[in-house]
């Protein structure tokens, strides 16, 4: 078990190293001189040279890469070319809203999606089942920003229940925070629920056909126990997996949702950096989100053994 | 012995798919909706009531009126015409992405599945590529390469490739142990011949299904890229950039987002439903899982 966890953790290293290589090459191999882009059209050759010098662009590629990795390992994410502040402090100041909304989304999604999936599988081919399926196909088909705008239109502009845009940190009180964060989280929840409910239903359907479910029912176990103790627990591993792989979807969704609701989170920070070609910020953000994705999936992999004692390594 | 026909079992379901026997009502409606949308966008230059780029400063942000059934946008351009024409490029980007990512994924997946030495390296690279959030990777690619149609297609394609590679590799890994592949190797068939004649047909069914899902997600991603400011430049309307332009006027005229959004969602919904139907028909084993 411990050996397995150790091996899984070590396997993260080559993946992250490759991600770093991709990100590095992505920015270095694109057409155009980064220094010229940063300096703008009016730059003098001397200015360009100074920027190249500052960014280390004059050195051979592999030296640039090694220098960069060395800095990363020391926790130095570089300095923004636009605002001239350290990237790490920029990320730290923008992390709060994103984390809060992502957490709220995950909680709301799991609380909604798992019961929906269980219900759909339990009442297979009933109206409830079709409703859940229809919802999950819809969730995959409407762009997340359109969902966001529809929510703003209905809940903010027509009903006036929530502010249209903006963000209040949780430190200002739970209620003001929720007033601003609920609609963005609900928007993200719509797509995440679609994914999780579908997977829950599929796996519950499979498990409900197993012999031990018939046995449990035959010995007179109440339906609630059958569904949640016997069936759901056995369907948990694939559901957990999809929550993990869906994390990438969540990151993409956060980026879009923060733009719709004008939330000063790291999603917005990343988009702004990409559009302004703020290379150090782009590199740091893509690396960081990839690392988070790998980390979440690593934790989920390891947690399998908690849900399914049959999995022993 | 020269011409071994591909295993019949792999081709048959593909043929059956086109006829859609005993499919429910939903996929049939989806097929009709999709057909109408595709025809409307193909015929858009002839059926659109106005030039989608023609401005009319006197009639800006107007509601439905004679001559403008869906009203006008902030430049007085006809919304209906823009939505119809916008579908052309959106669909084209989707189709191009689906074809390119399936083809590239097929080639890379075959190599990974058949050549053990290449497998480990290719799959680690695919793992790394999958770890990068696809939307971020795509906006970065477009922002760095310029907002051309080609770079948008490339940006949506690259994050899709690993999924296709994994699929093809899995199919090839199973198929290569089959007696008929072993027999072909024993008979001294050349490697390209084994790959093309014996392994490609096996990947056909899952690739058709995957291709429809990629088509749907590519149309969605194009819209998101445009929305974030990293899409095709607004000289050519797409569903995505019409919605992106509508953002500024959302409070006064939500239709600028809602109409193209509706067209796009209907289109993606139909493609997804058809994809599900294709999956159920091509792989009865999956049907049991997904119901």
Image (cartoon, coloured by chain):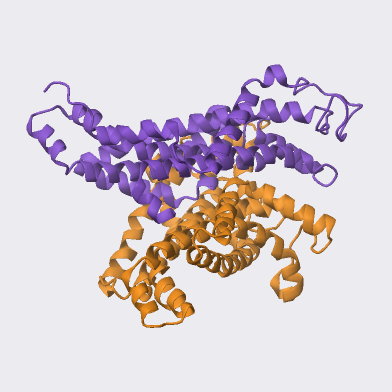
Chain colours: A orange, B purple
Quadrant location of the C terminus of chain B in the rendered image: bottom left
Q: In this view, does A172 lie above or below B143?
A: below
* Residue drawn at 58 percent across, 61 percent down: A128
Is A228 in front, or is B76? A228
Q: Answer with left or right where residue B285 lies relative to residue A171.
A: left
Q: Residue at x 85, y 44 (%)?
A: B252
Q: Is residue B187 above or below residue A277?
A: above
Q: Position of residue A173 (x, y in %)?
A: 74, 76
Q: Position of residue A54 (x, y in %)?
A: 54, 45
Horizontal relation, residue A113 to residue A211: left or right:
right
Residue A108 seen in render: yes
Residue B66 location, x and y as percent?
88, 26
Residue A301, quarter of picture: bottom left
Q: Can residue A58 be seen in this view?
A: no
Which quarter of the picture shows residue B176? top left
User: Quick check: A137 left or right of B15?
Assistant: right
Viewer-nearest residue: A160 or A68: A160
Residue at image coords 83%, 47%: B251
- Choose between B99 and B181: the one closer to the eye: B181
Residue B250 pos. (x, y %): 79, 45
Q: Is residue B106 above or below residue A109?
A: above
Please identify the quadrant where the N terminus of chain B is shown. top left
Left or right of A31 on screen, residue B283: left
Residue situated furthest top in the rendering:
B46
The quarter of the displayed image where residue B144 is located: top right
The tally of labels here is 0
Q: Which of B137 and B32 is in front in this view?
A: B32
């Amino acid at each position: 078990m411990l050996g397995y966890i150790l091996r899984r953790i070590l396997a993260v290293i080559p993946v992250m190293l490759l991600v770093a290589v991709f990100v590095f090459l992505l920015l270095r191999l694109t057409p155009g001189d980064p220094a010229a882009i940063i300096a703008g059209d009016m730059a003098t050759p001397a200015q360009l040279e100074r920027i190249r010098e500052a960014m280390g662009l004059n050195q051979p590629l592999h030296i640039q890469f090694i220098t960069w990795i060395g800095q990363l390992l020391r926790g130095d994410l570089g300095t923004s070319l636009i605002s001239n502040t350290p990237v790490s402090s920029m990320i730290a100041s923008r992390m709060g809203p994103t984390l809060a909304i992502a957490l709220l989304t995950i909680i709301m999604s799991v609380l909604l999606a798992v019961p929906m999936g269980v219900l759909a599988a339990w009442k297979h081919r009933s109206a409830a089942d079709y409703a859940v399926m229809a919802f999950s196909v819809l969730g995959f088909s409407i762009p997340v920003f359109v969902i966001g705008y529809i929510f703003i239109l209905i809940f903010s502009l027509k009903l006036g229940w929530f502010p249209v845009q903006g963000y209040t940190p949780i430190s200002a009180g739970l209620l003001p925070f929720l007033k601003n964060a609920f609609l963005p989280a609900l928007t993200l929840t719509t797509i995440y629920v679609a994914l999780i409910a579908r997977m829950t239903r599929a796996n519950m359907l499979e498990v409900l056909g197993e012999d031990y479910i018939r046995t449990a029912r035959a010995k007179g176990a109440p339906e609630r126990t059958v569904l949640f103790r016997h069936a759901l627990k056995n369907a948990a591993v694939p559901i957990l997996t999809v929550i993990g792989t869906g994390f990438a979807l969540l990151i993409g969704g956060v980026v879009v949702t923060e733009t719709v609701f004008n939330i000063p989170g790291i999603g917005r920070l990343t988009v702004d950096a990409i559009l302004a070609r703020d290379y150090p910020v782009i590199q740091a953000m893509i690396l960081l989100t990839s690392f988070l994705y790998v980390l979440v999936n690593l934790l989920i992999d390891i947690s399998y053994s908690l849900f399914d004692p049959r999995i022993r390594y | 012995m020269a011409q071994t026909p591909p295993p019949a079992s792999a081709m048959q379901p593909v043929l059956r798919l086109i006829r859609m026997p005993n499919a429910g009502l939903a996929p049939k409606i989806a097929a009709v909706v999709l057909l109408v949308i595709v025809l409307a966008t193909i015929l858009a230059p002839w059926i659109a009531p106005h030039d989608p780029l023609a401005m009319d400063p006197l009639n800006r942000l107007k509601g439905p009126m004679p001559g403008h059934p869906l009203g006008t946008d902030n430049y007085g351009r006809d919304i209906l015409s823009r939505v119809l024409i916008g579908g052309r490029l959106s669909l084209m980007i989707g189709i191009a992405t689906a074809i390119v990512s399936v083809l590239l994924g097929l080639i890379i997946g075959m190599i990974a599945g058949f050549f053990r030495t290449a497998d480990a390296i290719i799959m680690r690279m695919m793992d790394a590529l999958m770890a990068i959030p696809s939307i971020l990777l795509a906006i970065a690619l477009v922002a760095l390469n310029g907002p051309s149609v080609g770079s948008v297609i490339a940006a949506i394609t690259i994050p899709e490739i690993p999924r296709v590679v994994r699929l093809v590799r899995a199919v090839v890994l199973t198929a290569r142990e089959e007696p008929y592949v072993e027999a072909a190797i024993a008979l001294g068939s050349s490697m390209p011949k084994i790959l093309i004649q014996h392994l490609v047909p096996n990947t056909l069914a899952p690739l058709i299904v995957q291709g429809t899902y990629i088509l749907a997600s590519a149309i969605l991603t194009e819209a998101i890229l445009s929305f974030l400011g990293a899409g095709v430049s607004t000289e050519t309307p797409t569903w995505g950039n019409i919605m992106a332009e509508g953002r500024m006027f959302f409070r006064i005229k939500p239709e600028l987002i809602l109409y193209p959004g509706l067209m796009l969602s209907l289109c993606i919904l139909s493609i997804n439903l058809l994809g599900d139907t294709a999956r159920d028909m091509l792989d009865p084993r999956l049907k049991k899982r997904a119901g």
